[in-house]
């Protein structure tokens, strides 16, 4: 049964592979996730692999040593291609693709540096968000993504990493290329474009690194350089590639997260009442909004050996996709899973992953999203279209809105 036929139609089983690349799935994957959780929680997907949709299976998979992050030997990102493609070289040098224990020391060093920079950077967050909102309100555009969330996250992350070039828009294009690492890309021309943009991104960071060696400042790259020669420091390549990772994640997923949280909030009247009466904190609003509308929909793993998950046989080297977004709505774990609740514990949330590969920038992202959402709601912006009318980019593994028009006060 084709996935497109499942939308708007009740059924009790899936008989064929799920098409994660279909237009219908990009626009609203949640009915399919529910269908799979109830009937086929370990589902075959096109062109190969399996999708896990139940919270318990995903949690187990995140901790399993039988599922690795390193790219499959069949993938163009495999380490054998590191000398041929910038994308492969990068993929084999950043934390999301490196398995324990190889990622442990790098991860600890990066976490310490990110936390230290957060302490310096956070006091300026509110002021930057307020100034960007003033510019948005004065402008002609009503698109809160293009003219508020996107420039806000870009400027915040440029400051966080240490970019000083006032012409910052090209960094947005470079960060966009980074996320093609996390989904199969069969278009040869597009793959070449991605490699070229990643090479430019790396070149810019190399130049910044050399500047900061001579003149350290209060930014992340300076923090990483200062730890470079310590026993647990990062090499020059690791510093550059880690900055690419932190920057891209803090721009792309954050701007999408702002729109996703606001959209979830404005379709839930109870949540609006709770927030305005101070029964729901800003932190809870962001947490629940990201649970319901998760920007990073699923993360890939590769089976290290022939194995079985919930009764389904999976061959070695098969991709296994862990749907964080589906697990975040599993009714076996979350009471009133389709609603925003003020008292819900964050203990079971999968938004930022879990364990050795959980997102090191989760606090950084949440703070940015929270500051932006606070100003959107506080300045009285209201959606011109409901969540059901928002269009989403055709990007495998991510749920990023294209536009989100809002009425200004």
Image (cartoon, rainbow, N blue to C red):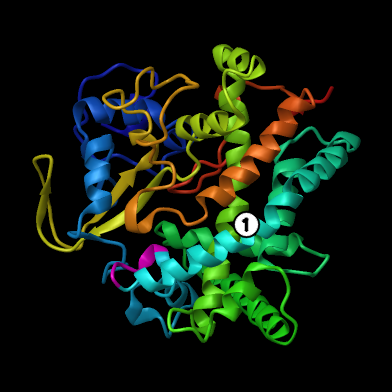
Which region of the structure is painted magenta?
A: 96-101
Q: Is residue 131 above or below residue 33?
A: below
| Residue displayed at 56% across by 25% down | 264
Residue tagged by mark 1? 118
Q: Residue at x 10, y 58 (%)?
A: 306
Residue 221 percent coordinates (x, y):
63, 73
Please identify the quadrant where the C terminus is shown. Answer: top right
Q: Quadrant of residue 156?
A: bottom right
- Could you tell me which secondary element the residue under label 1 belongs to? helix
Tell which of 306 and 352 is nearer to you. Answer: 352
Question: Does residue 404 appear left or right of residue 166 in this picture?
Answer: left
Viewer-proximal residue, 5 or 376? 376
Tell me which secondary structure the magenta stretch mostly adopts: loop
* Dot 1 crowding, Cα within 10 Å, few <14, some 14–19, many 20+: some
Is 301 positioned to the left or the right of 317 in the image? right
Q: Quadrant of residue 91?
A: bottom left
Question: Quadrant of the rendered structure where residue 400 is?
Answer: top right
């Amino acid at each position: 049964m084709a996935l497109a036929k499942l939308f708007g139609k009740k059924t009790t089983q899936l008989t064929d592979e799920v098409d994660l690349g279909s237009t219908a799935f990009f626009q609203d994957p949640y009915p399919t996730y529910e269908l799979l959780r109830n009937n086929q929680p370990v589902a075959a997907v096109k062109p190969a692999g399996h999708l896990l949709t139940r919270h318990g299976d995903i949690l187990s998979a995140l901790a399993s040593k039988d599922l690795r992050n390193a790219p499959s030997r069949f993938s163009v990102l495999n380490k054998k291609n590191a000398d041929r493609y910038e994308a492969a070289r990068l993929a084999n040098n950043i934390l999301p693709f490196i398995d324990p224990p190889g990622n442990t020391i790098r991860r600890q060093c990066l976490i310490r540096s990110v936390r230290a920079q957060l302490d310096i950077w956070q006091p300026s967050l509110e002021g930057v968000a307020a100034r960007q909102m003033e510019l948005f309100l004065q402008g002609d555009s009503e698109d809160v993504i293009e003219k508020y969330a996107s420039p806000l996250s870009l400027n915040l992350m440029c400051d966080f990493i240490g970019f000083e070039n006032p012409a910052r828009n090209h960094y947005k294009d470079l960060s966009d290329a980074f996320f093609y690492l996390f989904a199969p890309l069969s278009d040869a021309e597009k793959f070449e474009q991605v490699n070229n943009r990643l090479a430019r991104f790396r070149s810019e960071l190399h130049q910044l690194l050399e500047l900061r060696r001579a003149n350290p400042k209060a930014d992340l790259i300076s923090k990483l350089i200062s730890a470079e020669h310590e026993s647990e420091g990062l090499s020059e390549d690791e510093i550059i590639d880690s900055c690419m990772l932190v920057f891209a994640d803090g721009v792309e997923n954050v701007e999408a997260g702002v729109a996703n949280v606001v959209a979830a909030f404005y379709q839930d009247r109870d949540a609006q009442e709770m927030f305005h009466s101070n029964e729901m904190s800003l932190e809870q609003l962001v947490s629940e909004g990201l649970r319901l509308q998760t920007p990073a929909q699923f993360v890939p793993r590769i089976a290290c050996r022939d194995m079985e998950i919930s009764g389904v046989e999976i061959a070695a080297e098969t991709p296994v996709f862990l749907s964080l977004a589906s697990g975040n709505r599993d009714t076996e774990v979350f009471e009133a899973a389709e609603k925003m609740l003020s008292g819900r514990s964050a203990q079971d949330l999968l938004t930022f992953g879990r364990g050795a590969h959980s997102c090191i920038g989760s606090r950084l992202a949440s703070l940015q999203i929270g500051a932006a959402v606070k100003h959107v709601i506080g300045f009285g912006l209201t959606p011109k279209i409901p969540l059901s009318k928002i269009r989403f980019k055709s990007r495998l593994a991510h749920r990023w809105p294209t536009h989100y028009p809002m009425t200004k006060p």
